[in-house]
Amino acid sequence: MLAIVDYKAGNLTSVQLALETIGVAGIITSDPKVVALADRIIFPGVGAAKAAMDNLKQLGLADVLRDVVHRKKTPLLGICVGMQVLLNFSEEDGGTNTLGLVPGKVLKFQSTNRRDKVPQIGWNSVMWSENNHDDPFLKGVANGSDFYFVHSYYPVPKDPHCVLATTEYAGVTFASALRCENVIATQFHPEKSGETGLKLLANFSRQSRDFPSP
């Protein structure tokens, strides 16, 4: 079972429809018991870090996500805000402590030119990390492919080996995709990124249970 986490902030329908396009069934749920039983989890995101964390706590999902990731080693894919909330801390909303599943922090872009407006909205190139270019999540997608972004903040993981891919914007080369063991995350929206995004979703959804090991 693939669970799409409903924490009252995610872009749920777009993710579910994208999965249906590739023949994968995803269950939208805010039930911690269903999330705990899932074989695979997608943690989508649209919105702000504090609201996301408040909703996760109120729904009883924060502790469940920590448990399934750390103890059960369930594969999890975070998207956009769903990626940022996986780290320890975000500058958003005056500073927000987040899930802490991936060591690191989230910073706001400080654009100094008219070209790179904040938020970044639109397509941008994603370059695979030299150390992780053969990761199964990236299989069949060309290095330098364009993906769709909507964000004002970007992740800074503590461990550079977790960086799957990078993107340049507003004078910053930031981690646009991460993998830390069974946790994968993208700052861009694969569900809004055409065939290349669908390929990544298929790679995540269809791999065997030992997917966390590249």
Image (cartoon, rainbow, N blue to C red):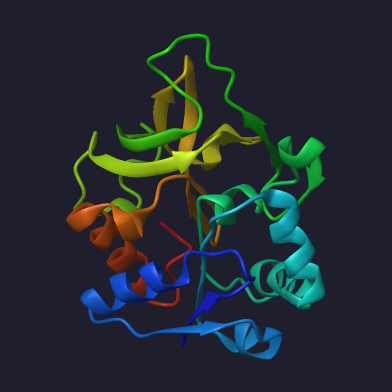
Q: Which residue appears at 55% of the width and 84% of the height?
A: 38
The quarter holding residue 190 reads bottom left
Position of residue 92 in the picture relative to residue 58 (left or right):
left
Q: Is residue 45 above or below residue 109?
A: below
The quarter holding residue 124 reads top left
Residue 22, image x and y in percent?
22, 75
Q: Which residue appears at 23% of the width and 81% of the height?
A: 23
Q: Which residue appears at 30% of the width and 51% of the height?
A: 138
Q: Is residue 172 above or below residue 81?
A: above
- Quarter holding the C terminus is bottom left
Residue 49, image x and y in percent?
69, 50
Can residue 147 be seen here? The reply is yes
Position of residue 5 in the picture relative to residue 209 (left or right):
right
Name the foreground residue: 45 vs 133. 45
Position of residue 121 in the picture relative to residue 203 (left or right):
right
Position of residue 5 in the picture relative to residue 167 (left or right):
right
The quarter holding residue 63 reads bottom right
Q: Which residue appears at 50% of the width and 29% of the height?
A: 174
Name the foreground residue: 34 vs 161. 34
